[in-house]
Image (spheres, rainbow, N blue to C red):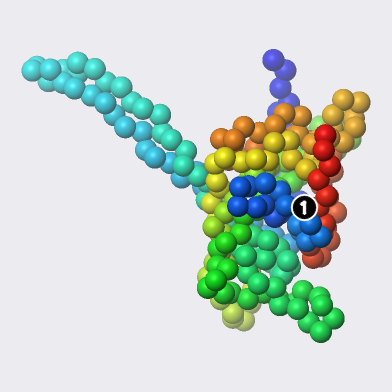
Amino acid sequence: MPAQCRSYVQGARLRVTRLDECGIPVEGLCSTVTSDGFVSVEMTDELTDAEDITQVNAQGVNCYFERSNPQLNFITVTITMCNVDPDLFEITTGSPIVLDSAGDSVGFATDTDTYATANFSLEIWTKIARTQACPPGGAEYGYLLLPWVFGASQGDLTIENAGVNFTIAGSTHAGTAWGVGPYDVVTGVGGVPSPLLSPLTDTTHRHMQLTQLAPPAVVCGCQPLVITSP
């Protein structure tokens, strides 16, 4: 079948969305944060190694040899941030928000009772290397989705004579209820903005594709999420 082959370069945007304990997006006034203040997002597949099943005969020759497939358990993800959005840290780690006298989010706390209690989704948009003219419909972007991340905590923190980066490290979870998602992230029939064209299976840990729908705008602080029925 025809395929679209592209080179993905640089990270343009990320968005985190609050999930409940079942991995379902949470409607509310403070459910999502979009940021370009990240340095990197690292992902590592964590596997159960393949096993060799073998038996030699009396002459030392294999009677049989079979190897099982490795099994994906989860994906570890580490987000390094260079811009501190307190609401993003609360959504991703469960860290309580610190408010000022005006009620604005100005920081977050590290607390035993809420440590690594959050569930969230992570979406990332990348740029596409411009090796050819833009296709009909305009510019393209890479779109990557981790539909359910849990158990995330803040990484080691160093204050020194340099910029201060903050890390968030967690793991993906099987059993996602993301479906096609609550956002328009691709173009559907006739170029109309649309959620994913096919729902994710509940065994999906990571989804990646091309899209011609531009990433969402950056806004400091959390934003509301209203989920409308299809």
* Disc 1 residue crowd, few under 14, some 14–19, many 20+, Cα 10 Å: some
Residue visible at 54% across and 41% down in the picture? 174
Total marks shown come to 1
In the rendering, at what x and y percent does residue 107 appear?
A: 71, 76
* Residue 41 visible: no
Q: Is residue 192 left or right of residue 152?
A: right
* Residue 230 visible: yes
* Residue 23 vertical placement versus 207 (above, below): below
In the rendering, at what x and y percent does residue 140 appear?
A: 81, 37
In the rendering, at what x and y percent does residue 114 appear?
A: 58, 68
Which quadrant holds residue 39?
A: bottom right
Q: Secondary structure at mark 1?
A: loop
Q: Is residue 62 left or right of residue 6?
A: left
Residue bearing mark 1: 27
Residue visible at 62% across and 81% down in the picture? 161
Q: Quadrant of the C terminus?
A: top right
* Residue 199 vertical placement versus 219 (above, below): above
Residue visible at 68% across and 61% down in the picture? 91
Q: Is residue 65 left or right of residue 22?
A: left
In the rendering, at what x and y percent does residue 78 appear?
A: 57, 56
Which quadrant holds residue 219?
A: bottom right
* Residue 74 vertical placement versus 32 (above, below): above
Name the residue type under label 1.
Glu
Residue visible at 87% across and 25% down in the picture? 189
Q: Nearer the viewer, residue 198 or 4?
A: 198
Which quadrant holds residue 203?
A: top right
Q: Quadrant of the N terminus?
A: top right
Q: Nearer the viewer, residue 227 or 145?
A: 227
Q: Residue furthest bottom?
A: 101
Q: Nearer the viewer, residue 172 or 36?
A: 172
Q: Is residue 225 left or right of residue 40?
A: right
